[in-house]
Amino acid sequence: MGLKMCKKHRSLCAEAIQKRGLSHLVSKSQSEAVKRITADMNSKVPTRNYDPMLSLVMTIHKDTVNFSFEGNKLVKDKKNYCPLCLVEQKNSVEDCQIRIDSLADEIYQMCEKYSLQG
Ligand SMILES: [Zn+2]
């Protein structure tokens, strides 16, 4: 895999989730995350298994592959790139934060719609 979010940007994502009061939905461990994704796989609407942090990180990865830079090439590369470091390099630190915040807002709205936020 050529994309892996760095520590700094993971913590910025975690902060964005926390600011929106969704931390209680975030998996405490990798194995919990895997279990929850598997449990949620067949449901059409998000359930209590929905993990906003995972969703945020995955969306950022997916967007990078789909829309920006040489996404597909990066995925095949042996070296790992952080998708948000790439945004910082190509655009700016500010753009990067805007991106995290707007995605986190979308996630919040979705959680609200399905009453997962409380
Ligand atoms: Zn990064």
Image (cartoon, grey):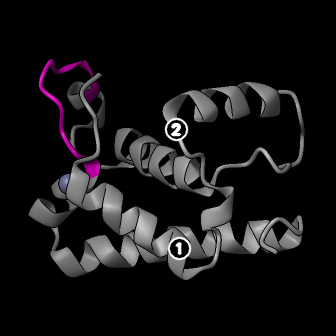
Name the amino acid type tagged 1.
Answer: Gln
| Mark whose residue sits in front, 1 or 2 | 2
Q: Earlier in the sequence, mark 1 or mark 2?
A: 1
Q: To which residue does mark 2 refer?
A: 29
Q: Is residue 24 left or right of residue 10?
A: right
Judged left or right of residue 55, residue 10 is left
The residue labelled by disc 1 is: 18
In the image, is residue 25 above or below residue 102?
above
How many discs appear? 2
| Dominant secondary structure, magenta | loop
Residue stretch rendered in magenta on the structure: 75-83
23 left or right of 6 in image: right
Closer-to-camera residue (13/33): 33
The residue at the point 77 percent across, 67 percent down is 111
Q: Quadrant of ligand 1?
A: bottom left
Expressed as whole percent of the image width and height from the top left, the position of residue 98 reads: 37, 79
Residue at the (22%, 38%) spot, across then down: 70
Q: Residue at x 43, y 48 (%)?
A: 63
Q: Amino acid at mark 2?
A: Ser
Above or below, 86 relative to 77: below
| Quadrant of the rendered image containing residue 76 | top left
Could you tell me residue 107's position as x and y percent? 65, 66
- The answer to whether residue 97 is magenta is no
Q: Quadrant of residue 72?
A: top left
